[in-house]
Every structure is written in structure tokens, then in C-alpha cells.
Image (cartoon, rainbow, N blue to C red):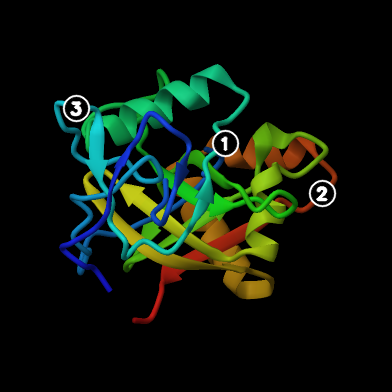
Amino acid sequence: MHRANGAVRNCSGRRFVSGVGLYQGIAASAPGHRNAAARCVGVGGHGRADGAKVLDVGMTIEGEYIPSTAQWVRDQVDAYEGSGGTAGTTLRDTGLPVVIVTNRGAKTGAVRKTPLMRVEHEGSYAAVGSKGGAPQNPVWVYNLRKNPEVVVQDGPSTWEMTARELAGAEREQWWERAVAAYPPYTEYQQRTDRLIPVFVLERTEV
């Protein structure tokens, strides 16, 4: 539950009390979003002149934020969150929208953030573990399997969500939606022998 009296923390550091802050495929929606104007290193937020930000203690992922080892991912997450969701919102030069998914590492328990393609249907998001058709899954797939609670930022809106891995007809339905949003997924599946994992991210019940 959102509380207006959130703690103030200097966001130049990596540890924070509560709050949050995926790029390989996701979907989201706008209705019923919660107020995410106040949040810290985990999910962006509105900056202050002294470099501090107000922490939204309603966001549930806690711990140390460890940025991606990929510079372009770090830069995009910083731009997306630092602008309140008005910059860095597309996949490089494609012009296609992305969202930022914050989750917890399966081994380290640390907070992780990844830009994923925006694939949305009726308020839920699909997260597609394509990794460009590589032989192995992206690391965040294992994170979601162990720790399904995530926070999704889609533009200026942020939601707490729960990830659920799909199979059978439900996976096929979401896969079609993902391909419609980002056609290269079809080629990525052809490149690899593994079945690309697909998760649906659904609003967490309050």
C-alpha cells in the first residue's frame, strides 16, 4: 500500500530500504496504475536538488541494486527512470516501446533491472526470454522462476506484478501477441533449439 511519508534516501548509493527499479520482451497496460511519483534507485522517481529522491515504500522489492554489465542497458535504465519514463522508452533504433522490469536475482537476491519489449494485453505484460535466439536463457528467466514478484515501469506508470511462466495454449496465445509487437521473435525461435520461455506479468492483488 502506498504511503505518502516514504523515507528519503540518497540515490547515488546502491542500497535502499524498499522500492525497485527486463529487455528481451514484455507487455503492459495503463488502466488502474498506482501512483509511482515517489521512488528511489529501484524504480526511478523525481529528483531533488540535493541528489536525493523520495522512496515509495509501497514497492516491495528490497535490497542492493546491481546494474547490468552491459553499458547500453545501464544507460537505458538510467535514462528511463531518471526521466520519469519520458526518455529511453524505445529499443535503440527500432522505435519500438520497451518497459523496465525490476526483479530479484535468483542466486544473489540483489535487485536487477532489464528493459524488455512492451507486449501488452488487458493490463498484463508478457516477458519473452528470447536473448536474440541464443542457446541459453537470459539470466532474468531464472530470477523470475525463483522470485516471481516484480515491478514494471511503462512510461510514467509503475505497477507491482507477479510473473507466471506459460505453457500450452496460453503460451501460444501470448507468443502470437509478442510476435505482433516485435516480429523478430519468430526468427529468434528459429535460431535456437530451446523453446523460448514466455511469462505473463499480472497485477499483484492488494
Please tell me how many numbered marks the rendered image carries.
Answer: 3
Question: The residue under label 3 is which amino acid type?
Answer: Asp
Q: Closer to us: mark 1 or mark 2?
A: 1
Report the residue marked by disc 1.
Answer: 66
For the residues marked 3 and 1, what is the alpha-carbon distance in whole angstroms? 23 Å
Report the residue marked by disc 2.
Answer: 194
Question: The residue under label 1 is which amino acid type?
Answer: Ile
Foreground of the two, 94 or 34: 34
Where is residue 3? Give x, y as percent: 21, 67
From this view, report whether residue 138 is shown above or below residue 195: above
Q: Which disc is residue 50 wearing?
A: 3
Question: The residue under label 2 is which amino acid type?
Answer: Arg
Name the quarter where the N terminus is drawn.
Answer: bottom left
From this view, report whether residue 195 is shown above or below residue 94: below
Where is residue 90? Give x, y as percent: 35, 30
Q: Closer to us: mark 3 or mark 1?
A: 3
For the residues marked 1 and 2, what is the alpha-carbon distance in whole angstroms? 28 Å
Which residue shows up at 69% across the image and 63% down it? Answer: 145
User: How would you rate the neighbour count of disc 2 (Cα within 10 Å): few for under 14, some for 14-19, many for 20 or more?
Assistant: some
Instruction: Look at the numbered disc 1 and give the secondary structure of its residue.
Output: loop
